[in-house]
Amino acid sequence: MARRGSYAKGIAKREEILTTALEIVARVGYSRTTVRELAAAVGLSQTGLLHYFGTKEQLFAEILRRRDQVDVRAARESLTESPEPADDREGYTWIVRHNAEVPGLVQLYSRFSSEAAEEGHPAHDYFRDRYLTSRRRAGEMVRAQQAAGRLAADLDPDRLAVLLIALMDGLQVQWMYDGDVDMAEHLEYFWRLLERGGAG
């Protein structure tokens, strides 16, 4: 029984760490967030904190995974008209608009997405799997939009999915350099362009 209780406490502490870390990184950014600060915020030593994740990089990869879970849940709660808003175009726009409110997490995502391209990086599998899943979902969304008559039938859903993810990531990079770039407005403009159709 003691072992089961200890395991449950460990899971709860890990959840507390990720929830707290998500808030801190969103507020101050990846480069200004230290393991010492995160450990102090949850009443642990640095060694105690890393016991739950292994390394700082693995911790931050888990923060990104948690961010995705939280964002999808929040999008679904905010966009109640659609049963699966995170897979719908309004869901994509919601996520982009929300990202402008959490610059630290955008910074973490952008930094890690570049660094993790090297195999062996703790976040490599996360980004590989995330891009595969994101392209699949975006392709499904395009097909659904085509079936509903909102997008032209001659658009290639899979190629458009790649372009959509590239657009969203690229907008984030530009926004980090120039906060006047309205990511959500540009994504909406992209949707309007697509609605006009386009062969090829």
Image (cartoon, helix red, strand yellow):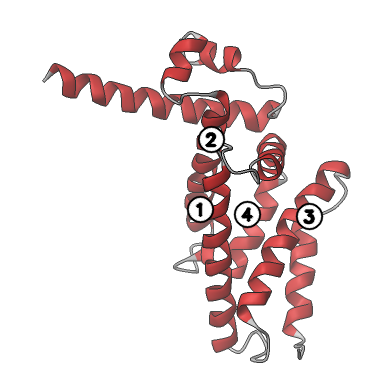
In the rendered image of this protein, does residue 128 appear above or below residue 11?
below
Front: mark 2 or 4: 2
Residues at marks 3 and 1 touching, judged by CB atoms closer than 8 Å: no
Secondary structure of the residue carrying tag 4 is: helix
Label 3 or label 2, whichever comes before in sequence order: 2
Q: Residue at coordinates 52% horizontally, 75% vertically from top-left?
A: 140
Kind of residue at badge 4: Ile
Residue found at the very far front of the displayed protein: 119
Question: Residue 130, can we see it?
Answer: yes
Q: Residue at coordinates 84% horizontally, 50% vertically from top-left?
A: 174
Kind of residue at badge 3: Leu
Residues at marks 1 and 4 touching, judged by CB atoms closer than 8 Å: no
In percent of width and height, residue 150 lies at: 64, 85
Quadrant that contains the N terminus: top left
Residues at marks 2 and 1 touching, judged by CB atoms closer than 8 Å: no
Label 2 or label 4, whichever comes before in sequence order: 2
In the rendered image of this protein, does residue 120 appear above or below residue 24?
below
**Which residue, given by chain and number where applicable, does mark 2 sit on?**
63
Marks 3 and 2 sit apart, C-alpha to C-alpha, by 21 Å
Marks 2 and 4 sit apart, C-alpha to C-alpha, by 17 Å
Quadrant that contains the C terminus: bottom right
**Which residue, given by chain and number where applicable, does mark 4 sit on?**
95
**Which residue, given by chain and number where applicable, does mark 3 sit on?**
171
